[in-house]
Image (cartoon, rainbow, N blue to C red):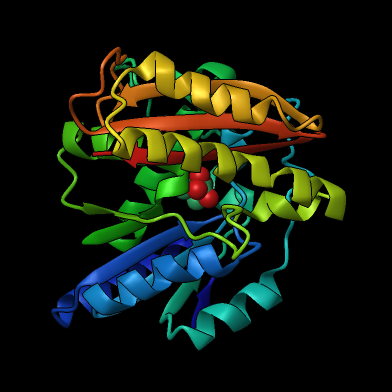
Amino acid sequence: MKIFTTVKEIQAYAKEQKAAGKTIGLCPTMGALHEGHMTLMRAARKKCDIVIASVFVNPVQFGPNEDYDKYPRQFDADCEKLEKEGVDAVFHPEPLEMYPEGYGTYVTVESGITNVLCGARRPGHFRGVATVVTKLMNLARADEAFFGQKDAQQVAVVRRFVADLNLNVHVNMVPICREESGLARSSRNAYMSAEEKQAALVLSRSLKKAREAYDAGERSAAALKDIVSKELATEKLAKVDYVDVYTFPALQPVETVSEESLLAIAVYIGKTRLIDNIILK
Ligand code: PAF
């Protein structure tokens, strides 16, 4: 597996692969890789000739009071996992390589989809995501890009700017990968104590209840949100940030679920902010 740290190296590699007629799949990550990330690598491995993973904790998508400094970094362990999945190349730049002195160009999605859910709570977050993902797609000359459904709003944002900027990249959304307990896998799960991890099961439990109600015919967004909120309220360590339903991927408000919609939640367990969701089809 090749490891590149500079823009020049990844550009040369991607150029070589394209010249050889290969399709390139990109899996952008911030590292601290877990089984959820591996499902992205496997999806890319199945679909593309060449799989490029990026491992980059992107400073511009973190707010001033967020966890940029404390975000787990474990590049050697990440490489071992990527190699096992048959990833061809890893791009692992330093922040100054991506944002050198004088850097001044950002991608801002202004359609309103960044003003709800996490976008409303984390100002500037999706501007940072859209900027880095545009750069990574461009550097890797990606034909396909792979993202997890856990960050469904991120997928909606990426799909929006890929369409708006006419980028020739197909955006794949890979289903949420859960632990056996139901907890959605996340690099931030590592912040939680055993007691908090146990408490965090309330997220998937609440969504499961909503899914059951939906399958039994419930279509009122308010009723579905109520089911989730009531279950979340049973856990004393849980502090709800949001419980909301929007169409997916347009992220328009929903009163009655009549088209593909996203039921998304963000909940603090202690100091750790967790997100989870289900898609109602
Ligand atoms: O989902 C993530 O880990 C990040 O937002 C991404 C897509 C790698 C961009 O930094």
Nearer to the camera, 198 or 169:
198
Judge from the rendering whether residue 60 lies leftward or rightward of residue 156; answer left or right: right
Q: Quadrant of residue 143?
A: bottom left
Nearer to the camera, 33 or 254:
254
Q: Is residue 44 above or below residue 168?
A: below
Nearer to the camera, 137 or 230:
230
Decide if residue 70 is in sight here. no
For the C terminus, the image quarter is: top left
Q: Quadrant of residue 279?
A: top left
Residue drawn at (51%, 63%) of the image: 36
Residue drawn at (56%, 64%) of the image: 92
- Name the outermost residue toward the front: 216
Q: Residue 239: where, in percent of width, then height?
A: 73, 25
Q: Residue 256: where, in percent of width, then height?
A: 26, 16
Q: Residue 128: where, in percent of width, then height?
A: 50, 34
Residue drawn at (73%, 60%) of the image: 73
Judge from the rendering whether residue 145 lies leftward or rightward of residue 75; answer left or right: left
How many dots with numbers? 0
Decide if residue 182 is in sight here. yes
Q: Residue 125: where, in percent of width, then height?
A: 53, 29
Q: Is residue 149 above or below residue 82?
A: above
